[in-house]
Image (tube, rainbow, N blue to C red):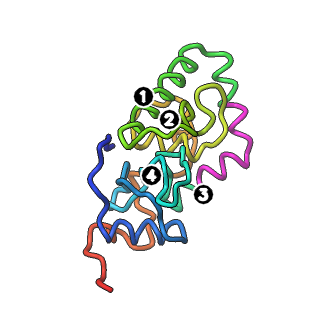
Amino acid sequence: MTTPPFAAPTPAELAVLSAQLGRTVRGVVGIAARCACGNPTVVATAPRLPDGTPFPTFYYLSHPAATAAMSTLEATQVMPELAALLEHDETVAAGYRAAHEAYLADRSQYGEVAEIEGISAGGMPMRVKCLHALAGHALAAGPGVNPIGDEALARSTWSPDVCRCEDPGAALREAPSE
C-alpha cells in the first residue's frame, strides 16, 4: 500500500504499465500498489489527462491477472450481491461512503477538476458499478478502507501476494534506452 503523494513513475514502470494495458499510458502520477514481484498492480492517474480530458478514476487496476479476476466476478453476478450489502448493512454502507471521501481526498492532491467534482469511481458512494475500480482502490488504500473493494478481492481467485506477471520484476529493472 502506498498513499499520495506518489513518487514519479520510472521509465521501467511506465513500460510495464503500457505492456499491461496494451497501450501507452497517460497521466500517470505514481504506482499505488504492486505485485509481490514489484511490478505495478494499481496505477494512480492524474484527474486531468495531458490532453485536457477529465479522468475521475484516480486508482486504475493495471495488472492483467487482477483485471481478469474482477471481470470474472462481474460476469458471475457478484456485483448485485455486493450492492445488497450496501442496502442491508449500515456498517458496510458507512464504510463505503467513507471510502468515497478518502478516494476524493487522495485524488485532490493532484488537482481539482470541476467536471468531476464529487465523482469518485466504481459507483461510490451509493452503488456498485465497477469492481476493477473498487479493487484498485482497496489495494492502493489497504485493507479496511473500501469494504466493497476488500470483499471483491476476498472473493477473487487473484492475490497480490502471488506473482502472475509475464516478466516478474520488470518494473524494478532499468528500462531500455531508446
Disc assigned to residue 116: none
- Name the outermost residue toward the top: 90
Q: CA distance from mark 4 to mark 2?
A: 21 Å
Query: Circle 3 — which element?
Result: helix
Q: Position of residue 133 (x, y in %)?
A: 55, 44
Would residue 51 appear left or right of 4 to someone viewing this image? right
Q: Taking 44 as reference, is 65 above or below it?
A: below
* Residue, disc 2: 150
* Residue, disc 1: 144
Q: Taking 14 as reference, is 124 above or below it?
A: above
* Residue, disc 4: 45
Query: Circle 4 — which element?
Result: strand
Mark found first going from the N terminus, 3 or 4:
4
Quarter of the image for residue 11 reads bottom left
Q: Position of residue 164 (x, y in %)?
A: 45, 64
Chain part drawn in magenta: 69-81
Amino acid at circle 4? Thr
Query: Circle 1 — which element?
Result: loop
- The answer to whether residue 74 is magenta is yes
Nearest the viewer among 134 and 144 is 134
Q: Nearer the viewer, mark 4 or mark 2?
A: 4
Mark found first going from the N terminus, 4 or 1:
4
* Residue, disc 3: 68
Q: Taking 51 as reference, is 83 above or below it?
A: above
User: How many residues crowd mark 3 within 10 Å: few (<14), some (14–19), many (20+)?
Assistant: some
- The answer to whether residue 68 is magenta is no
User: How many residues crowd mark 1 within 10 Å: few (<14), some (14–19), many (20+)?
Assistant: few
Q: Taking 69 as reference, is 125 above or below it?
A: above
Q: CA distance from mark 4 to mark 1?
A: 22 Å
Amino acid at circle 1? Gly
Q: Are marks 1 and 2 in contact (CB under 8 Å)?
A: yes
